[in-house]
Amino acid sequence: MRLFGKKTIFTRNLLISPPQPSDDRRGVAIAARAKNEAPYIGDWLLFHRAVGVRHFYIYDDGSTDRTIDVIKEILSPDEFTIFPWSSRMIDEGSKQFLDTQVIAFAHAILNFGAAYKWMAFIDVDEFLLPKIGSTVEEALEGAGGFPVVSLPWHMFGTSGHKTKPAGSTLFNFTMRSVIPSNDKKNGMAFKCIVDPCEVVQVGVHHFCTRTFGEINSNDAGVRATREGRKERAFYSSKYLQLNHYYSRSEQELMEKIDRGNGRSSERYKQSVLRTLQRVEAETVQDLGMIEFLKKHNVDLSQACADAE
């Protein structure tokens, strides 16, 4: 039997008992899975440290480049925790893959969530941009303390770059989709920031809490069900915007495709190219990230040096 053929997901959601909050819990942590992100993870770390992230929990999916070295060069030992996370597991009964990203997120909440007011679950090509205030925690005040904040993807494509440009992704890519996601049907897809001590169900794009069930808030305090989030009335980026640098340059996109994601290579390639086509079908220039970097004097030069 070919176990690693067509990829299907078995654990889309996990039920957990939330941790008891520590008396001195505070601040924001990020949990992310990463693999061979050496050219990019420096930008991501420096930016998110500048916007107030206390700790990074990195689930390393078998990196063979300098990803781990870059993390250690940029952050102090008390700012990060790295877990070897190179795992491919299949449920014996259904013969379906276990979603190790969901397992990683649940692990982060259960083992470390008690220490933080907030935990964000994003990827290394996603950036939490405060639109009001200078930190993620200040921007989250717009949600009024609601325990799950859903942030829609703002999808950035190639911005016309054929090959990888010199310097930071955050300065080089400014053209994004007018519709802030790549969702075919409704136009929005999400990543979340949560109060880890309230979460009872963990997913990649949606979390449930013991007090409010499946109800999530946007960054401005508007609440909706899981499906209700996709209504246009739920969309907001007034306080906090999630930038997803989906493709970077055409060269980098093809390198991403060549790395694959465990699926059939041709099927994965066509999926990625279709997504890029949707992202670039109608675009708008978004200089919010550059304006923030300049206003708050965020220095990304160390990341640029590591990427070269």
Image: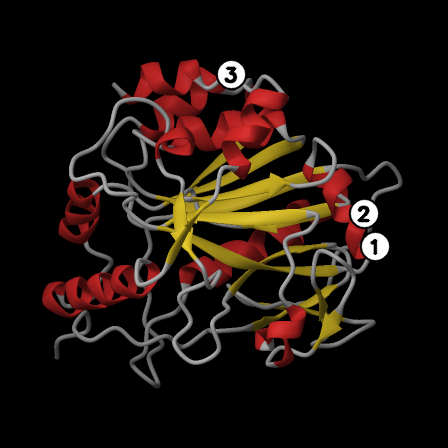
Label placed on residue 299: 3
Q: Residue at x 49, y 60 (%)?
A: 180
Work out whether residue 130 or residue 174 is closer to the camera in this orientation and state it. Answer: 174
| x, y percent for residue 107 | 57, 54
Whichever of labels 1 and 3 marks the residue nearer the N terminus, that label is: 1
Foreground: 69 or 287? 287
> Label 1 belongs to which residue?
145
The image shows residue 237 at horizontal and vertical percentages of 63, 53
Q: CA distance from mark 2 to mark 1?
A: 6 Å
The local crowd at label 1, few if under 14, some if 14 to 19, many if 20 or more residues have their Cα within 10 Å, is some
Gap in angstroms between the C-alphas marked 1 and 3: 30 Å
The outermost residue toward the right is 23
Q: Nearer the viewer, residue 289 or 124?
A: 289
Look at label 1 and name its amino acid.
Answer: Gly
Tag 1's secondary structure? Answer: loop
Identify residue type, mark 2. Glu
* Up-down relation of residue 94 to residue 77 (above or below): below
Callouts 2 and 1 close, C-beta under 8 Å: yes
Q: Residue at x 35, y 22 (%)?
A: 69
Residue at the disc numbered 2: 141
Of circles 1 and 3, which is in front?
Answer: 3
The answer to whether residue 17 is left or right of residue 154 is right
